[in-house]
């Protein structure tokens, strides 16, 4: 009962804010209350930055509320790719990691390498290798070939790129 009464009071407060040209205060009130759907009503039509910020806030709340998949999806839609990859990778959602990695432009080196890191961590060496290959990190590709004991591929890549014969000061081939 209290929630319904107070919800009416919040609505009235929001209407008063709007009436006096203070939509931002209504937006802040609803986001503080984690009433994100109500907050959307007070986003400026042209203010996409506030929209992204609202999605980020909702994603952070979802992450704290033990809804990591929803949080990751919201972070992706808000352009917070690294946060999304971190959540996805920590939970070991391989298909989702691959999908994110494939959708990234090869110029997005750091996010792709982060995807590759998590794929490697979860023993998905072929997928990790594909991500490293996408960004041209052939040293990491050679390392994966060596870890997977795929010697033919490792030797072929090293023959094409002799600089990878030495690794960390040691000759590996």
Image: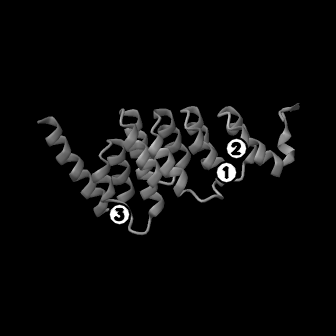
Image position of 148 with respect to 23: above or below: above
Residue 139 location in percent, x, y?
Answer: 76, 43
Q: CA distance from mark 2 to mark 1?
A: 6 Å
Q: Which residue is mark 3?
A: 21
Q: Nearer the viewer, residue 55 or 85?
A: 85
Residue 91, image x, y percentages: 45, 33
Which residue is identified by label 2? 141
**At 66% across and 47% down in the image, what residue appears?**
132
Mark 2 and mark 3 residues within 8 Å of each other at the beta carbon: no
Which of these two is toward me, 95 or 4?
A: 95
Name the secondary structure under disc 3.
loop
Residue 99: horizontal and vertical position, in percent?
48, 51
How far apart, in angstroms, are the residues tagged by discs 2 and 3?
57 Å
Q: Mark 2 and 1 residues: CB-CB less than 8 Å, in contact?
A: yes
Q: Residue 71's spot in the image, x, y percent?
A: 41, 43
Which numbered disc, 2 or 3, marks the residue that appears first in the sequence?
3
């Amino acid at each position: 009962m209290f929630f319904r009464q107070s919800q009416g009071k919040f609505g009235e407060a929001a209407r008063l804010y709007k009436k006096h040209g203070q939509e931002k205060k209504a937006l802040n009130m609803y986001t503080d209350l984690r009433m994100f759907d109500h907050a959307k009503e007070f986003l400026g039509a042209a203010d996409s930055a506030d929209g992204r910020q609202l999605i980020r806030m909702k994603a952070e709340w979802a992450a704290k509320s033990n809804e990591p998949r929803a949080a990751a999806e919201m972070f992706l839609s808000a352009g917070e790719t690294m946060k999304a990859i971190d959540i996805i990778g920590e939970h070991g959602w391989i298909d989702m990691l691959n999908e994110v990695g494939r959708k990234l432009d090869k110029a997005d080196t750091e996010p792709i390498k982060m995807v590759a890191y998590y794929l490697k961590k979860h023993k998905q060496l072929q997928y990790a290798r594909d991500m490293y290959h996408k960004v041209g990190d052939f040293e990491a590709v050679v390392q994966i070939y060596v870890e997977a004991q795929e010697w033919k591929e490792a030797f072929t890549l090293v023959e094409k790129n002799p600089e990878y014969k030495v690794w960390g000061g040691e000759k590996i081939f």
